[in-house]
Amino acid sequence: MLLQLKEFIREKRNKPFSFVVNCVGMSLAFTALIILFTYVRAELNHDKDVVDRADIVRMKNASWGITPGAYASWLAGNLPEVKQYCRVLEMSMAIFVPQQGEIGEQYVEENIVLADSTYPEFFSLRLLAGNLKDALVTTEQVILSESMARQLFGESDPLGKQLVLGGAIHSTVVAVYKDINNPGLRRPKMITNLNYVDKVWQAGYSDSWWSSNWETYFKLTPGVDRAQLTEKYRQLYAQKLKSFGWEDANIQDELPQAKFSEFNELYFTPEVDFAQHGNRANINILILIAVLVLGVSIINYVNMATARLADKARIIGVKRTLGAGRRRLISSIILDSVVTCFLAMVIAWILAEISFPYLSDWLGCGDVLNIDKWAGIILFILIPLLSGLLSGIFPSVYLTQMNRLDSMNSQRNESIALQRVKGGLMVLQFAVSIGLIIATLLINKQVEYIKHLDPGYDRTDVVVVKGHGEAVLLEKFPEFRNLLLQNPSIVKVAAAKEPIYNIGERGGHLRVPGSGEEIGGAVTWIDENFMDLMGLKLIEGEEFQEGTKNRGKFIINQRMAKRIAAESPDHSYLSERQIGVVKDFNFKSMHQPIEPMYFGYINDYQQMADAYIRIAPEDRKATLDYIEKCYRQIYPQTFYQYSFMDDDYAGLYGSEDLFAKRLLAFTAMAIVIACLGLLAFVAFFIEQKTKSIGVRKVMGATEYQIMELLNRDFIRRLFIAFLIACPVVYYMIHLWLGNFAYKTSLSWWIFVLAFVIMIVIALLTVSVLTWKAATRNPVDSLKTE
């Protein structure tokens, strides 16, 4: 073994070029593998920190995972299989840190959770200070994440410190828990009791049967049969709906939608809720890319080994003549590749450690490489070992099966079979690179398409002033609106419960005229100016008018009108309650099709609102300053925060943007590795053709003809690789587009562009060498022979 290692060092010292190319290529591939492994493993282990995750379910109605708050205690009291329940609502909130009895520093946070007191135990929060057992009993108690405590109070002890929530509720910090970095779990910065909504929004809201804002979780007795539990739930649900006056036919239609979702499956389940979800298709694509990048680097190694066939063959021939057995020779060649791979893994680990902190936001899985013992064994032992075996097996078998005399003949030509293998490997390498370029271009095209597709409303030049769950904004809104409209740069002002592009509440039911049946749909609340401000088109009926005449009335969209018409064809979908029909618009992201929905009048809601302000595009800064001045005049004790709707809307596709960037980065890495291999291969190819090039130049060949000769074979292989890559990528991207309700076309020019890009990259890579060979003095070329 020691002798073989000495031989390895001597050979690499004598032939450093191929070693450097192989080592750099493998290092880049392993770096990508380490980073992607960490990310994918975090995604797949998204719920590992929750101790009882196998026994937790979430209540589900229809296609959404949010329900009215009253269902939790009702079901827990009627199902003995339920040990505990926990209701959860995530929201943004203004937080004030009192200083000497007055309101001091103000913060606004978006990851605030309102929940039952069972939340810490349910989701296995890790206590750092205080007492979680008796926390969250009242709204006067809050618990903070480690980072939030540091943000608010620095290095001082946060326990016992006072906070003012939403400008109304005075609370005491009773515990601090460790930050949550798991992608499948909520990452709340602060948690308080859900009775906050009863005090700030509306009395009894948390136990209402009608307002669907809560994610309702149940912890079950271990081993409960889910099918039997679901059947019991549906029987209870049917009784409850009947008590609400539902018709039997409607109840039977509703029951199949009533079920429980397993907690450990929620992250990859595209239900409508307020939680963050992963995309299994994107993860599978990234895993495939990691394998392809590694495959490209292995192909590089094989090509480098076979390119130096004559040198290797002579060494093998000498060893066999001196009595070395074939098994020892094979092990020697494989050891060469394995040692190279382990060296590359060491370099890759250093690169990953250096780069990972800068990629934490990009990956969303913490800023430290979190690799346990078994993951370390897989990454740092099995991967380089398998890569080394795969890289060395073909060269070792091929070289050791050669005749001794042939192997020692320096003028021996490559066999046709070997040429085909090398050509095939190069084609495969190019096919991977071209395929990744096509995929990157198409995915970016889809992301840009959905970001710029007309959703049915005008979001440009709209400023959103956040309400942060405070009813005070709605109470004083007319005064605020009138003050704003005194500025000629402010065109329109309106109020709405939630953003038009993310209408999340799904608890609404409209009664069908003439039948008594009810139809479920999305619902949100707006004022009389909102539709005009957003450019929504009323196609039938009338809009809301200012005043009390709108109480209990709704404006439905076209999808809801069609549903009502289908249920009751003999009656109009307009009635005393349904006063108008708005043209369909996308009120969720472009992943989802348009569904039935309706608007209620915001004064019926009496909870909270955001202000929507359309401004003139000129002199934005002065207009924004005026808006802030008016806000502070009307709401002096309330935190001011604004955003542009365009920016908020773009945030809907943040995960797609990140995925496209990840794909671009690893595609670039694969291309760099492929080009390194191509560069080395061309260098060896030119070295073999030195005499041929010299003879052709003596016979009158021009530099252009020489370069054409040298490049022609690579262009041909690129074209074959393109033909292989196109159908494979077309099929895979077609599957990926299935995640979207609105899809871009798979344009032919994207495929051609990818081919052109790869040709340009390949030619730029090899042209320096081919030009040098073409312009070389033929006397020098022939002298080397």
Image (cartoon, rainbow, N blue to C red):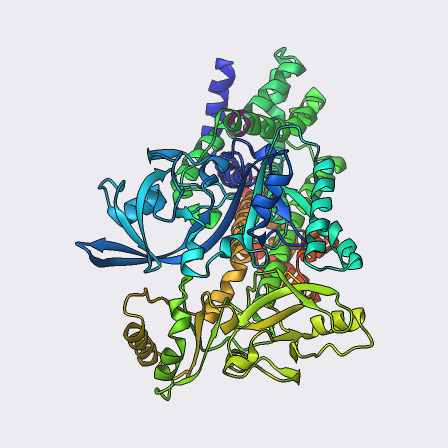
Quadrant where the C terminus is found in the figure? top right
Span shown in magenta: 377-381
Q: Is residue 466 left or right of residue 693?
A: left
Camera-nearest residue between 624 and 41 = 624
Judge whether 268 appears above or below 110 on screen. above
In the rendered image, the residue lying farthest to the right is 570
Residue most toward the top?
323
- Residue 571 lies in the magenta stretch: no
Q: Position of residue 355 (x, y in %)?
A: 41, 43
Closer to us: 24 or 124: 124
Q: Quadrant of residue 43?
A: top right
Image quadrant assignment for residue 300: top right
Q: Quadrant of residue 572?
A: bottom right
Pick whichever, 431 or 16, lies toward us: 431
- Asked if residue 266 shows in the view, the reply is no
Q: Please provide percent x and percent y for residue 451.
A: 56, 67
Q: Is residue 271 above or below residue 750?
A: above
Name the one closer to the observer, 538 or 352: 538
- Give the residue furthest to the left: 100
For the stretch drawn in magenta, what is the main secondary structure? helix
On the image, the x and y values in percent for residue 337 come to 56, 27
- At 53% from the left and 58% from the top, the residue drawn is 657
612 relative to 395, above or below: below
Q: Is residue 501 above or below residue 712?
A: below
Image coordinates of residue 349 in percent, x first then y, are 44, 34
Q: Determine the residue positioned at 54% across, 48% down.
A: 666
